[in-house]
Image (cartoon, rainbow, N blue to C red):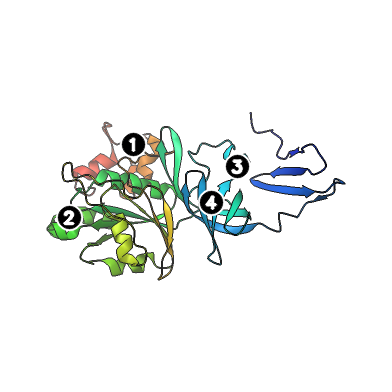
Amino acid sequence: EDIDTVASQRVSGKGEQTRHRTVKGNLIVDEGTDALGQVDLDVNAQRTLHGLVLKVHGVESIVQLADGRIFRCAVRRVLKNMATDQRHVLVAGDKVMLLPEGEAQGWIVRIEPRRSTLSRSSKQRRHVMVANVDQLLIVTSAAQPSIKPNLIDRVLATAEQNHLDACICINKCDLIDASALQPLIGTYAQMGYRVVMVSAAMGWGIERLRSITRDRSSVVVGQSGVGKSSILNALDTGLKQRVQAVSLENQKGKHTTTTAEVFPLSYGGSMVDTPGVRRFQLWDILPSEMSGLFRDIRPFASNCRYPNCTHIHENVCSVKDAVADGRLD
């Protein structure tokens, strides 16, 4: 029903001093008028500034300009009311245009097209966690809480769907015998993913993580309590992210980070810290597409007898045969 709606509209108020609003796509331009009704079409277009959304907290967004200035901005109602399948119209990592109001406040009047997103499903709606990143750092822990391969698999499938580089980071390796993780690490390494064993408390593997994240836009994702904020503090001592201990009763992490936030790194690049996830439901992925999102299953799936093979109950299935022969984990 919305396909043929008019893409621009003009609303004028009463009185001698009026203001007009023009809506063109995602760009909102307020046009000042004088008593004679003369409209200066570029009066605000020339005032707009380009910035990066560092954090979205309620109705307020923290935006950083290229020169380092920080603005606290609200989103224009026209953008907030746009029809969308997303839970929020603006996320950390978005590139925007803002109209300044004073020295440190402004209005976000345009959201630039996103080159990449990381999304999951939340209450049957799309929850865009972060935008415009190059790679995904999947953080898990060897203990307290224990490692969850199923969660890693879900995030890896999402990374493949969105064409994002992925690196698996196993934290708290000082708490266990590292040899116990070798079978799991070998499986992911054979699939072509980088796996880094880290201890943020002891400083193990931090230098390698710096080399992986240097001059790139990265986002860390993982369940609560795995040490995402601790790793960020170890990578860049100037960040000073707040951390908490894991609950001794259920070995689950506490939600210390409450919103996604972009942190520029002193050695180059940026890192987005995200709140801990206990469930990562896939968004916009059909069951028939799943096998194509796993690098190890993909070569075998094309040899199955049936094109719609689910690799679960079919009699002639190349994937099931590869598992039985030990060629596939």
Give the residue type at disc 3.
Leu
Q: Which residue is mark 1?
A: 305
Please state which of the two labelled residues, at mark 4 or mark 1, is closer to the viewer.
4
Question: Dot 4: within a 10 Å radius of its alpha carbon, few (fewer than 14), some, or many (20 or more) residues?
Answer: few
Q: Which residue is mark 4?
A: 114
Q: Position of residue 246 (x, y in %)?
A: 21, 49
Classify residue 67 by image quadrant: bottom right
Give the residue type at disc 2.
Leu
Would you say residue 171 is visible in this rendering?
yes
Q: Position of residue 329 (x, y in %)?
A: 22, 47
For the residues labelled 4 and 2, the Cα–Cα distance comes to: 37 Å
Left or right of 36 in this view: 224: left
Q: Which residue is mark 3?
A: 79
**Which one is in front, 58 or 309?**
58
Please state which of the two labelled residues, at mark 2 or mark 1, is closer to the viewer.
2
In the picture, the quarter occupied by the N terminus is top right
Q: Position of residue 88 (x, y in %)?
A: 49, 41
